[in-house]
Amino acid sequence: MPDDEQQPPEASIVPIRRDESQGDQESSSLPAVPCQEAGPPDPVEIYLRSLAPGSRRTMREALDKAARRMFGASWDSKAGDVHALLNAHTAPWQRLGHQHLQTMRAELAEWYAPATANKILAAIKGVIKECWRLGRIDSETYHRIIDVATVKGQRLMRGRALELGEIRSLAATCKEKKHAEVGMRDAALIAVLYCCGLRRGEAVALELADYDADTGAIAVKKAKGNKQRIVYTSNGSKDALDAWLHERGRSPGPLFCPVNKGGKVDLRAMTEQAVRKILQRRGRDAGVKPFTPHDLRRTCASELWDAGVDGATIQKILGHESQTTTAKYDRRGERAKQEAAKALLFPF
């Protein structure tokens, strides 16, 4: 969940309760939900495996949160920490009803941004669909649940686009490192994230064979949504990448690799968290306001819009499923509103 969103109290949602005194009878609020029996097939695992690898962790976390909030009260308090025991895989999703998801939707709409709320709803509906396919719920129940509407609304875009001066400062700090290998790698990494608009997960998944030094083309083979695309380095970004490869060498393996304290390149893949730490360190050294790896991707899109590149091309570069998503990175409208505000004068 986004860090800046208000977190709801764990017990605020009306849970699917189980009345111990009434056994399997319905309680005064919602139907009893016994715990799901262990053993395959697991509808949650089936659903998660239908997603791209990069999306599985996000949706598993969404399901874990939903499971704790919707089914937590059905656990025996003597079992210990209820919320620690209950997760996406142990929750009894096959006992979920339309009224339960409607209650959950109301809570999500109140506490989270529409995109976050709809992500959780989509994960729940995905699991319910697998429950239906496995014969654990009937068609009528399935269609009533998936008929629950999405949360409407739109929030301001998070993050920011960096200014050209900030990009220059980041590049300059890469030349000040004690070991040239570290500086060249960091410069190439920043160049690829900024000029090619890559996600950090896409960058760390690149192999040396994915880069064509003759054309500057990079084949992004492990992108979000299991899609592949070609992006191009140029105007300094190719120079930065070639300089890094001169230090790295041409041995097969990951394009971006860790470098030890002695300046030796370790031919193994970097982690996404390592990318974040590198950018944070470079940002502090350069005196740049805090930014995230995704802000470099956002900057790429913003600069392309400002340069007059058409939306369809920007969409292909970023690998967006919808051009509506690409349009969110267009900051020209904000600049126009800022200029329009100057037409009004308040005599104070």
Image: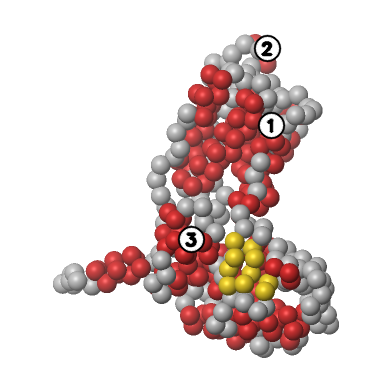
Q: Is residue 60 above or below residue 38?
A: below
Relative to the observer, which residue lies in front, 340 or 86?
340
What residue appears at the point 59 percent right and 39 percent down from the top-left corner?
A: 123
- Report the residue marked by disc 2: 23
Q: How many marks?
A: 3
Q: CA distance from mark 3 to mark 1?
A: 33 Å
- Report the residue marked by disc 1: 43
| Residue 236, position as x, y percentages in the image | 58, 83
The answer to whether residue 321 is visible is yes
- Report the residue marked by disc 3: 315
| Residue 131, position as x, y percentages in the image | 65, 27
Q: Residues within 10 Å of mark 2 (few under 14, many from 20)?
A: few
> Which is nearer the N-term, disc 1 or disc 2?
2
What residue appears at the point 50 percent right and 39 percent down from the top-left corner?
A: 108
Relative to the observer, which residue lies in front, 205 or 96?
205
> Which is nearer the N-term, disc 3 or disc 2?
2
Could you tell me the amino acid type at mark 1? Pro
Could you tell me the amino acid type at mark 3? Gln
Q: Is residue 337 above or below residue 60?
A: below
